Image: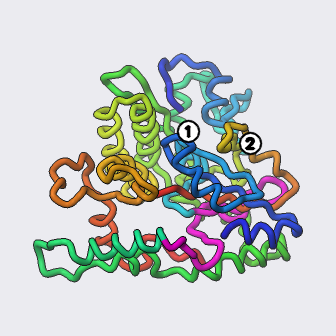
Amino acid sequence: MWQALRTELHPLGVEIVTVSLELSGPEASRPFIEAAHPEHPSLLDPTHRMDALFGVVNIPNVIWIDENGVIVRPAEPGWPGETVYPESMRQMLAERARAVAEAPKADASPRPDLIKLLSGGQDRAAYPDAIRDWAHNGTSSLYAMSPDEVVAASQPRGMEQSRAAAHFELANHFWRSGQREAAIRHFNECHRLQPDNWTYKRQAWSLVGNERVGGGDFGRFSQVPVPGEEADWPFASNFDADVAKLEPGQYYPNTF
Amino acid sequence: MLLERLDVDAAEFRLGTGWEIKPEGACKDDVCVPLPGGFDLTRTAERLGMALVRDEEHAIWALGPESLSAHALVTAQAPELVLGDLDGNEFRLSSLRGQKVVLVAWAPY
């Protein structure tokens, strides 16, 4: 998907760089990277430096940097076009959406439509067109922001968000060294301090979710307790519960 | 930035945070923050709005990113980013100077 756009725009002086925000080793990202057959740099960011450096709060998030190393669009939701998932992944997502729709509910509130909540509010095809416009028009592209606009449009950050990043770094450190209790404690504090940072949440939930379903190709996409094992889930919330609280368009705020 | 002790020097601070200590203060691109009394980790972190979080049980700290601009970015100048690829080869974002870069954060979850 990104590789196709790269093939098209590289002759115009555009390079794509993908960065995987996954705390586990390279093997978690390898199947996805290799399936894409990239000709561009495909990097690994196990400590989530992208969050602290650029204000990434969800994935996918995209940043545009010009020839002089100046950011012209800060981190925002972005896609290479309409998302085309492999069949196996489409099946997995359909099963997840069905599980959310059919889960026993304590109240009469409407069941969340997971697919709608995750994909609503965005014209994904508009994003590569914007990149094309920038590739052709450079600084005179309407999509290229001034330095002041870039800073002002980057994610809000106060001491709470800085503390969240610090707790995430500690959680990462403890998880990688096998100190789970300490890791969970810091993940939970991180999530409490910056609840709108989805990548901090998704990373943490995926680590335990993956274990609970026994791994597999898409084990990391399981970010909820296994039914019947809710009491054993160490986090304050989970993916389905948090997404269900959103309005369509809130998960990926409209980019343009 | 993870810390096992708080008496780091300016060089280590720069390596971990991207902020360079100069006579005018702590600087990132052309943004400089005066440091009366010179560089000291705790005072400098406070001036830059960097949270310093301690894990009580394990005697380790983490220094969060700066918040003094009330935004994730202080400047539009892209920071240097040095990350490895699948084979462990190091790649520097600055090596792409002269090209337009579309930097995509994704995850296998």
Q: Position of residue A96 (x, y in %)?
A: 34, 70
Distance from the alpha carbon under mark 2 to that under mark 1 = 28 Å
Q: Is residue A214 visible?
A: yes
**Local SS, label 2:** strand
- Chain containing the residue with disc 1: B
Mark 1 crowd level (few <14, some 14–19, many ≥20, 10 Å Cα): some
Q: Quadrant of the N terminus of chain A?
A: bottom right
Q: Is residue A250 above or below residue A66?
A: below
Is residue A79 magenta-colored? yes
Q: Is residue B33 above or below residue A32?
A: above
Q: Quadrant of residue B81?
A: top right
Tell me which numbered mark, 2 or 1, is placed earlier along the sequence: 1
Mark 2 crowd level (few <14, some 14–19, many ≥20, 10 Å Cα): some
**Local SS, label 1:** helix
Q: Amino acid at mark 1?
A: Leu
Q: What residue would you read off at disc 1?
A: B48
Q: Residue at x 78, y 78 (%)?
A: A133
Left or right for B30, reference B59? right
Same chain for mark 2 and mark 1? The answer is yes
Q: Is residue A143 above or below residue A207?
A: below
- Which coloring applies here? rainbow
Query: Which residue is farthest left?
Result: A106
Q: Residue at x 40, y 55 (%)?
A: A219
Q: What residue would you read off at disc 2?
A: B91
Q: Position of residue A128 (x, y in %)?
A: 69, 76
Left or right for A153, reference A173? right
